[in-house]
Image (spheres, coloured by chain):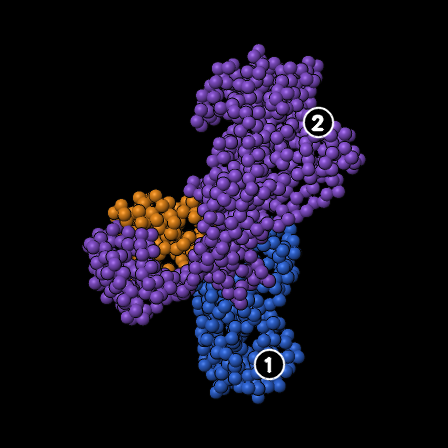
Chain colours: A blue, B orange, C purple
């Protein structure tokens, strides 16, 4: 039996549920693996895990938000033969990764304004926050399985990898980014008929009655689909909700936020550029109030924008 | 002051680039801190190119293109640049980089004096802002 | 690297630059020379390439616009492809604009570093040479189209002239006399119509419209839909028997509703082609015309047909229409109200027109003694057309003058905003109309209506100069409606002609390239580009013909290979590149983008746009651009 450890970091629980929902496939995996740690699923002690000499497969879920997270991630990963970053937080920092813009102390200070408990004191035994980061900022995992939560497509691929590894003891590649290496526009169920995307301005969802057969961008609604990796089968888009980019960039290491900014700039009011004077154009662009939150909702921590933030003055 | 800013200037081939040639032929003088990179059109400039410049140590990025609405040699590349730069400036602000470190100017092929003015004023502005990140490189 | 005498070497430490450049990645050879553009300088490059088996060359000298070609030839002579050579300016961009030797030297190194970085990603490409079909299509048979077609034909180029109506001649054929010389329009136009019809290289299709266009510059496949004429042109003897027996009478388009014509008719006597035409919309198929035709030329069974032509260039000369006056109800437009438009007035003035040249009221035939002309009807009006229609000031002056000459005891009033008479002999012409007694009133007209009791046309306006309201009771009011483009959206899209919001074709550069549009091989002439008078239309048509001939006579287009290319494995068919391409060079084929290399101009807007990096401008790929940026920063 191979040893499988599932380590949660700063997590919402979605990844746990997704992994548990594997159901029969999980049972198949358990023919080869023993779960040596997974807080929500099995009753195993962390101390035992820490004492183990090696772990075969480590699945890390969530972002790294505390010293404890960081320590576990580092120490346990060192013992693991295969490291899996599961979920967008683990791969790209996810939503918690947006916190990387602020110093941990400032985050605590902000939270203090909202709750009564005194948070600064370590006397409570509260974990100490660190600059929020992705699991991939600590180690270079062999398997990257993004998704918020990870989709069936990604989990099926992961299952396949785990089973193959159990049988062969080998991985197909040094780094594997799961999902399909294309953006969501490929095979988009909206299957647009027009040849151009003339984005008629920027609209919020409540401002427009969405045509469920028409490209979101053509209706003025920002959709991250063009720059987002196809880790899913378009559930949001089928539900008439635009992609917000949880799949991350199409290629590992590229920056979907900058790509999407460029694409958006190209198609926005493309037929009216000359009619509008610059303030008119600017007015539309100003409707994007929060550039980072819009284009980097899930991927800020691994982006060039974050690197620039560090360059500009570290934390703060 | 011994610190000299490092500035990359993307000039389009047809307008700002041509103006820079005229500036040369006219022997106008401007600050040598600016290194020009000629692009076919400002519409070719991707946000990555600009961010890459900052990440690799540039203190400022200047973009010179053809006047809107009608001067662009490739019809409307300048508008694409305008929109990209506008959004990028907002992004810069959010990550704590002064948006003034990125400037877009329309400079026609005949406006060599404007080019000189723009370059010099941009260098002055970056000098005032100091090095990106506050550390002397 | 070149010294350019002291032009570069005087400011830049050339030796130091060469030493530093040698340290750049992949640089195996670097040298300097006093005048690199000289014969020995070029030899130096050629020998270095051969001796060191170089696979790329950077020349740092003056500006590429001066000597790019010189060194490209040298590089080719050395056996390399010209696209693995980069030239950067360290003279205009450096030594000539800086005085500090150390800083200028450092900058030179940085500039050269960008070129080296770019060169490392450059690949060799071959120029494509594309045969051009030596044949042109002219869309629109008005004065602009006729001029362009004739001009091309006289240069030996076969021309297809497509006209929507039953005759060529366009709006000009309707005119009486033309400003400022008062030549009779028919007298100067009909010889041209006859000439173009006679010319062996011109093939005219009337009642025809462009149905589809495929292909690109040099080879457009055009389908032309031809409506049935019902009369064989070559057999029609113009005897007019058919017209006399035809029982159907409808209003005449040529006289703009001021007279009647039959369902088999000839638009006007000098129509080209010179033959009758059946109005199938109104014809009741009684067959009388078929019976009386002595040459059996009438065929009521004729069907619509579609023909296909291949041409190398297309000239669009679709002309104009008048602004629809129904949109200005306060002016009560309508011949029954004796409120007519300027083209109707042309017909009234014409000796071939509905009144044989006598100025009579359309409603009751009463001779007109007092007429009011209103300019800028729809034009220069934010509620209608914001632009100036350019020709109305002049033709209104002409109308007033001709009226006063025709009716010596008549009175003519002209409402105007400004009199715009910029043109040779134009100001003098307006003066002449005024000296003949035309009364010019600066101001706008608020209302026009027909007084049912007296039969007068009442024009209420405001005289700005006297600051008072003014009411004129007249026999006739003539409106000068704005000029609108006759180009329809479908045709514009088929031809990929960019248009402005008023459907006027957008030229590629308003000053330098006034008859070309962004899609290569398409040219514009006449009012399709904007309102203009006859001399301007003819000048532009001649220019369009000359530009088309440049292309067609050369016989081929040589295409720079520096165009965008698509990695079809990466492309997701999101269409952003299609949207951003100003030339319509990209289309989605089987779900992925495909670049038409002939049409692409290499601006690279698509490369910056693509969200997944699938479309790349050759030799200016994204990775090259990033490397250029990094290279500058690496130099210390």
Q: Which mark is residue C550?
A: none
Q: Is residue A220 visible?
A: no
| Camera-nearest residue between C356 and C64 | C356
Picture quarter containing residue C103?
bottom left
The Cα–Cα distance between marks 1 and 2, rounded to whole angstroms, is: 96 Å
Label 1–label 2 contact, CB within 8 A: no
Which of the two discs, 1 and 2, sits closer to the camera? 2
Looking at the image, the residue that sits furthest to the right is C286
Q: Along the horizontal axis of the image, is C245 left or right of C525?
A: right
| Camera-nearest residue between C584 and B42 | C584
Examine the rendered structure and indicate whether residue A30 appears above or below residue A270. Answer: below
Q: Along the horizontal axis of the image, is B5 left or right of B71?
A: left
Looking at the image, the residue that sits furthest to the bottom is A1
Q: Which mark is residue A42?
A: 1
Q: Residues within 10 Å of mark 2 (few under 14, many from 20)?
A: some
Locate residue A54, reporting x and y percent: 49, 86
**Secondary element type, mark 1:** loop
Pointer 2 residue: C260
Q: Along the horizontal axis of the image, is C467 left or right of B22?
A: right
Examine the rendered structure and indicate whether residue A245 appears above or below residue C157. Answer: below
Residue at horizontal 59 percent and vertical 25 percent from the top: C346
Residue at horizontal 38 percent and vertical 48 percent from the top: B15
The subunit letter for the residue under badge 2 reads: C
| Camera-nearest residue between C312 and C333 | C312
The subunit letter for the residue under badge 1 reads: A
Locate residue C373, reporting x and y percent: 57, 21
Numbered disc total: 2
Q: Is residue A29 visible?
A: yes
């Amino acid at each position: 039996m191979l040893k499988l450890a599932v380590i949660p970091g700063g997590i919402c629980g979605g990844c746990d549920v997704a992994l548990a929902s594997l159901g029969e496939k999980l049972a198949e995996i358990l023919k080869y693996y023993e779960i040596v740690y997974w807080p929500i699923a099995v009753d195993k002690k962390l101390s035992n895990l820490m004492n183990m000499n090696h772990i075969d497969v480590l699945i890390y879920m969530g972002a790294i938000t505390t010293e404890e997270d960081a320590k576990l991630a580092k120490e346990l990963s060192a013992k693991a033969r295969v490291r899996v970053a599961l979920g967008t937080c683990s791969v790209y920092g996810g939503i918690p990764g947006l916190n990387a813009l602020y110093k941990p102390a400032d985050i605590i200070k902000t939270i203090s304004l909202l709750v009564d408990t005194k948070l600064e004191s370590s006397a409570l035994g509260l974990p100490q926050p660190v600059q929020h980061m992705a699991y991939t900022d600590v180690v270079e995992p062999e398997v990257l399985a993004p998704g918020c939560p990870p989709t069936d497509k990604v989990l099926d691929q992961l299952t396949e990898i785990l089973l193959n590894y159990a049988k062969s003891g080998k991985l197909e590649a040094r780094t594997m980014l799961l999902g399909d290496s294309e953006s969501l526009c490929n095979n988009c169920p909206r299957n647009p008929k027009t040849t151009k995307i003339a984005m008629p301005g920027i609209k919020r969802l409540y401002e427009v009655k969405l045509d469920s057969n028409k490209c979101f961008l053509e209706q003025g609604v920002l959709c991250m689909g063009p720059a987002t990796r196809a880790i899913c089968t378009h559930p949001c888009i089928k539900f008439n909700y635009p992609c917000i980019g949880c799949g991350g960039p199409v290629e590992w290491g590229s920056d979907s936020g900058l790509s999407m900014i460029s694409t958006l700039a190209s198609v926005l009011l493309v037929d009216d550029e000359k009619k509008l004077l610059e303030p008119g154009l600017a007015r539309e662009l100003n409707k994007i109030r929060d550039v980072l939150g819009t284009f980097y909702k899930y991927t800020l921590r691994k982006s060039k924008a974050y690197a620039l933030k560090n360059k500009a003055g570290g934390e703060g | 002051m011994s610190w000299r800013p490092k500035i990359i200037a993307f000039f389009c081939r047809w307008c700002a680039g041509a103006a820079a040639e005229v500036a040369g032929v006219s022997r106008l003088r401007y600050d040598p801190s600016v290194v020009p990179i000629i692009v076919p059109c400002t519409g070719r400039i991707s946000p990555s190119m600009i961010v890459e410049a900052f990440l690799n140590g540039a203190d400022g990025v200047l973009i010179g293109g053809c006047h809107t609405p009608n001067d662009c040699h490739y019809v409307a590349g300048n508008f694409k640049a305008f929109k990209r730069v506008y959004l990028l400036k907002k992004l810069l602000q959010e990550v704590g980089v002064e948006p003034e470190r990125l400037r877009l100017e329309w400079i026609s092929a005949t406006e060599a004096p404007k080019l000189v003015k723009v370059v010099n004023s941009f260098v002055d502005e970056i000098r005032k802002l100091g090095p990106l990140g506050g550390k002397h490189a | 690297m070149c010294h350019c005498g002291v032009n570069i070497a005087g400011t830049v430490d050339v030796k130091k630059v060469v030493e530093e450049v040698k340290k750049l990645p992949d640089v195996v050879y670097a040298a300097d020379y006093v005048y690199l553009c000289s014969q020995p300088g070029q030899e130096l490059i050629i020998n270095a390439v051969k001796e060191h088996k170089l696979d790329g060359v950077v020349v740092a000298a003056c500006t590429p616009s001066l000597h790019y070609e010189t060194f490209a030839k040298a590089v080719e002579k050395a056996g390399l492809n010209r696209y693995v050579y980069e030239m950067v300016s360290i003279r205009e961009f450096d030594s000539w604009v800086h005085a500090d030797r150390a800083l200028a030297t450092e900058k030179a190194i940085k500039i050269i570093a960008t070129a080296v970085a770019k060169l490392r990603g450059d690949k060799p490409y071959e120029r494509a040479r594309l045969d051009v079909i030596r044949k042109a299509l002219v869309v629109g048979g008005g004065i602009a189209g006729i001029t362009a077609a004739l001009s091309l034909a006289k240069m030996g180029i076969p021309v297809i002239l497509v006209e929507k109506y039953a005759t060529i001649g366009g709006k000009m054929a309707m005119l009486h006399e033309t400003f400022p010389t008062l030549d009779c329009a028919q007298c100067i136009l009909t010889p041209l119509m006859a000439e173009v019809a006679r010319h062996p290289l011109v093939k005219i299709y009337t009642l025809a419209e462009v149905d589809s266009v495929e292909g690109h510059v040099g080879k457009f496949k055009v389908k032309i839909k031809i409506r049935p004429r019902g009369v064989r042109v070559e057999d029609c003897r113009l005897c007019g028997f058919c017209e006399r027996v035809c029982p159907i009478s409808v209003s005449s388009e040529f006289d703009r509703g001021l007279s009647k014509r039959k369902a088999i008719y000839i638009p006007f006597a000098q129509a080209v082609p010179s033959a009758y035409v059946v109005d199938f919309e109104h014809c009741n198929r009684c067959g009388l015309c078929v019976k009386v035709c002595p040459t059996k030329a009438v065929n009521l069974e004729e069907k619509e047909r579609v023909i296909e032509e291949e041409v190398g260039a297309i000239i669009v000369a679709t002309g104009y229409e008048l602004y629809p006056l129904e949109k200005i109800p306060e002016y009560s437009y309508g011949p029954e109200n004796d409120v007519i438009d300027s083209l109707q007035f042309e017909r009234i003035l014409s000796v071939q027109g509905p009144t044989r040249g006598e100025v009579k009221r359309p409603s009751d035939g009463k001779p007109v003694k007092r007429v009011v002309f209103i300019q800028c009807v729809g034009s220069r009006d934010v509620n209608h057309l914001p632009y100036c229609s350019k020709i109305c000031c002049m033709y209104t002056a002409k109308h007033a003058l001709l009226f006063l000459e025709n009716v010596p005891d008549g009175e003519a009033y002209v409402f105007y905003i400004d009199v715009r008479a910029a043109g040779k002999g134009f100001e003098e012409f307006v003066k002449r109309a005024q000296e003949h007694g035309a009364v010019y009133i600066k101001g706008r007209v608020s209302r026009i209506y027909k007084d049912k009791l007296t039969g007068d046309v009442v024009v209420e306006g405001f005289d700005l100069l006297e600051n008072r309201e003014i009411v004129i009771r007249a026999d006739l009011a003539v409106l000068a409606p704005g000029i609108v483009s006759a180009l329809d959206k479908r045709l514009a899209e088929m031809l990929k002609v960019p248009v402005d919001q008023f459907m006027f074709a957008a030229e590629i550069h308003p000053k330098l390239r006034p008859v070309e549009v962004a899609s290569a091989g398409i040219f514009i002439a006449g009012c399709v580009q904007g309102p203009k008078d006859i001399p301007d239309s003819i000048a532009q048509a001649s220019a369009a013909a000359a530009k088309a001939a440049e292309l067609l006579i050369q016989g081929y287009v040589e295409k720079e290979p520096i165009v965008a290319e698509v990695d079809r494995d990466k492309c997701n068919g999101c269409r952003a590149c299609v949207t951003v391409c100003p030339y319509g060079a990209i289309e989605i084929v089987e779900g992925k983008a495909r670049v038409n290399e002939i049409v692409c101009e290499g601006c690279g807007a698509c490369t910056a746009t693509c969200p997944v990096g699938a479309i790349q401008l050759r030799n200016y790929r994204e990775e090259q651009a990033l490397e250029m940026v990094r290279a500058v920063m690496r130099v210390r």
